Amino acid sequence: MHTTRRALLTSALATPFIRPARAAEGSLTLAAYSGIFEDNYRPAVVEPFIRANPGIKVTYYSADTSASTLGLLRAQKEAPQIDVAVIDVSVAKAATDEKLFVKYDLPVLSELSPRAINPAVNGAAVTFDNLVLLYSPQRVQPAPTSWKVLWDSKYKGQIAIPAAPDIVGIGLTIMANKSFGGDDYRKLDKGLAALSEMAPNVLSFNPTPDPYTFIINGTASLGVGWNARGQLYSSKSDGRLAAVLPDEGSLFQINIMGLVANSKNAAVAKVFINYALGAEAQKSFTERMFYAPVNAKAQISPDALARTAASPDRMARMLDVDWLEVAKIRDGVTEQWRRRILTRT
């Protein structure tokens, strides 16, 4: 059938004009942890994002600690150079209170675990990590199943634990409290008393660079650390290090991804945040570094899932800790460590 010019014109006028979706363009600066975190976050999340969004440039600012990032945000408050920041939830609360982070409302938020959102914090969780018991498979047999192995006198002088105020020391205090009969993580008398009894077993409350290295090089047999690093170092240790979630359970450490107030690149920053919290990025990072995913729709491989706290049976053993409540007692707990625990070694 021959189509006339008039028919084509009539059809064009009847059809609404649809403008093609415009790809996001611009640049953003992400401040996140340096070292092993950066080594894995770049290839798992940042680089795939750039490939999917070639019009957006991402600069990764390497930060040593959450506190150092907070200091930078404070210094740049009037003219921020950072657009998105990854920091610990208790530090993110300070950033929220000081109006350094602003709220964001993105489609991905509906997919996140309830643990990922804290009404007192602007932002959402981007990683869940959990406290684990570290051990040497050669020197600790059978494999430990309880936090109470740290109290076994046969391991005297063979334990490495970062002391409070390090979050590992605070976390261990909470788990010791639960393991020895405490029922409220905000009242840690039983945990502190138990750690005071355990302290003579400890080789170092300042393992440098970390307890993972102490165990890998044979300096220690037992330690306490975080699952993501424990699993990653375990894979590279030729069997000299293993990490276990004890029968009494564990607790999550939460990192928040925050949108910096007054960012000049807020539009593309939100595109990145929506991607980083999405199922694809969460799957990629979990399978690379064994953080539990914050996105409930992330389809994690069975092998990777078994090395996180995200399986249903392990989730049932996780203590529900509000780190903002812990922050209120952190100084007091640290002082008790100085008086009752560090003096016993």
Image: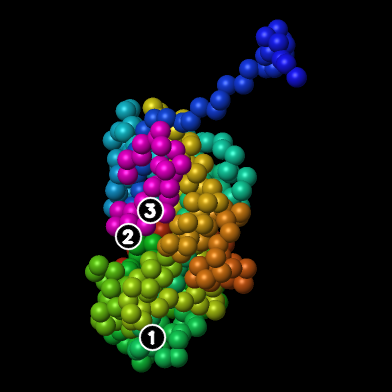
In the depicted view, which residue is nearer to us: 56 or 231? Answer: 56
Q: Amino acid at mark 1?
A: Pro
Number of the front mark, 1 or 3: 3
Dot 1: what SS? loop
Q: Residues within 10 Å of mark 1 (few under 14, many from 20)?
A: some
Q: Which secondary structure dominates the residues rendered in magenta?
A: helix
Q: CA distance from mark 3 to mark 2?
A: 12 Å
Residue 49: % across, % down: 44, 44
In the depicted view, which residue is nearer to us: 322 or 317? Answer: 317
Q: CA distance from mark 2 to mark 1?
A: 23 Å
Name the quarter where the N terminus is drawn. top right
Q: CA distance from mark 1 to mark 3?
A: 31 Å
In the depicted view, which residue is nearer to us: 52 or 234? Answer: 52
- Residue 93 on the magenta segment: no
Specify the quadrant of the image occupied by residue 155.
Answer: bottom left
Mark 3 or mark 2, earlier in chain: 2
Q: Which residue is mark 3?
A: 43
Question: Which label was assigned to residue 9?
Answer: none
Residue located 37% across and 33% down the image? 27
Q: How is the image coloured?
A: rainbow
Q: Amino acid at mark 3?
A: Pro
Residue located 29% across and 48% down the image? 62
Mark 1 or mark 3, earlier in chain: 3
- Residue 52 on the magenta segment: yes
Residue located 29% across and 57% down the image? 35
For this orientation, the residue located farthest to the top is 6
The stretch of residues the image draws in magenta is 34-60
Q: Is residue 287 left or right of residue 169?
A: right
Q: Which residue is mark 2?
A: 36
